[in-house]
Image: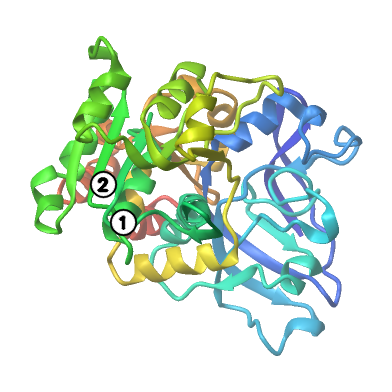
Amino acid sequence: MKVKAVRLHGANDLRLDEFELPEIKDDEILVKVVSDSVCMSTYKCAILGTKHKRVHEDVADHPAIMGHEMAGDIVKVGAKHQDKFKPGMKFTLQPALNYKGTMWSPGYSYEFFGGDATYCIIPQEVMELGCLLEYKGKAYYEASLAEPMSCSIGAFNAAYHTKMGVYTHEMGIKEGGKLAIMAGAGPMGLGALTYALHRDIRPGMVVVTDVNQDRLDRAAHLFPPEEAKKDGIDLHFVNTGNVEDPVAYLRELSGGTGYDDVFCYAPVAAVVEQSSGILGRDGCLNFFAGPTDNQFSAKMNFYDVHYNSTHVMGTTGGNTADMIESLELTAQGRIDPSVMVTHIGGLDAAASTTLNLPKIPGGKKLIYTHISMPLIALDDLRSKEKEDPRYGKLADIVEANKGLWCPEAEEYLLAHFTEE
């Protein structure tokens, strides 16, 4: 069958291709992709090409489909998997396969498997690993966003703490503790924030920092500190660009003791060093943001490592259990992944969006693969109303939902903008 997909041919070389998808094998599954959210990791893959650890050397001859935060419908199931999966099921998947020690992953490594496509083929290893998940919710975008949400969920679950003289790690963030999300008013930081505020084991204090006041204002609008206070959480938003000594200010805000858990959401040396500087005793620093520079480094206070048991770690992606937790919490209405989304677009916008991602302000960019639409900010929908009344209707729906994307908006989009 003929499909369209955005594929990587080399560094900085993404193309919207039309090509023939082969027939599936008995151990494969054909799916229709409906939504895919654009990840900063995909940008890194696109600019690095074969220098990226997940991209194969012959990508010029066998281009890889981009996108790994996908959701859609199962179309055809190979004989081996017909007992578990059926045509018509909605799906999402955990892309961090780590299959037999390889780093291959959808959106980086496969010729016929990725999210920026109208249709793609899921290979046998995904089912073997239990990484293909049935999705029973209503909105496809919520399933797409389960993957980026699972990354933050995994980071929280991977945090650990110790007691003096006891050689056992207590896994997870400290309950009732003090938590900081550094450079955290972007899409991934807001995902971490909605999770921190609504998970079972919660901190008693959360501080979100950034240097962009507009992003901080939006975060405070979506997560009013007075609402968090009702749940027993002291929530603060801090513009560290307006503070002469960010470390001193943040430590004072903590009551002078520092923070139990710190998540660093930007690969910037100054932010890493601030993160190190605000750790309290036994503080756990998760360097969440993956740099493109393989020589990236920053200072850390090793006096505190020795005498105060501070420690640093990093996580990249989540696991299948984290994905399932994200889907369950979303279905229960406890977390709202839509806080990450600021733009929507069609498949024809995916390549340019990916290659220019750091230059485009806002949060997550959500791609609908069966739609032709330039990338547009949710705040700009109203401005297109005169030339196309459909945008006005979308604006009505979004504005009625605190400016957030929502199932009703997706339903309208798919009903009125889909090309096939």
Q: Which quadrant, please, contains the N terminus?
A: bottom right
Query: Of 102 and 381, which appears nearest the observer?
Result: 102
Q: Residue 124 location, x and y as percent?
A: 80, 69
Amino acid residing under circle 1: Asp
Q: Find residue 56 and report its image quarter.
A: top right
225 to 415, vertically: above or below = above
Q: Residue at x 53, y 54 (%)?
A: 158
Q: Residue 294 location, x and y as percent?
A: 71, 24
Any part of residue 383 in sight: no
Q: Residue furthest bottom?
A: 83
Q: CA distance from mark 2 to mark 1?
A: 10 Å
128 to 97, vertically: above or below = below
Q: Residue at x 38, y 29 (%)?
A: 183
Image side of residue 120 versus residue 51, left or right? left
Q: Which quadrant, please, contains the C terminus?
A: bottom right
Secondary element under disc 1, as helix, strand or loop, is: loop
Query: Of 274 and 81, which appears nearest the observer?
Result: 274
Query: Of 339 and 249, which appears nearest the observer?
Result: 249
Q: Find residue 253 and report its image quarter.
A: top left
Q: Residue 415 location, x and y as percent?
A: 38, 59
Amino acid residing under circle 2: Leu
Query: Of 52 and 257, which appears nearest the observer?
Result: 257
Asked if the residue at tag 1 contacts the one at tag 2, i.e. Cβ–Cβ closer than 8 Å, the answer is: yes
Image side of residue 259 versus residue 303, left or right? left
Q: Residue under circle 2?
A: 404
5 to 276, vertically: above or below = below
Q: Which mark is residue 127?
A: none
Q: Residue under circle 1?
A: 336
Image side of residue 161 versus residue 8, left or right? left
Instruction: Choose the circle earlier in sequence order: 2 or 1.
Output: 1
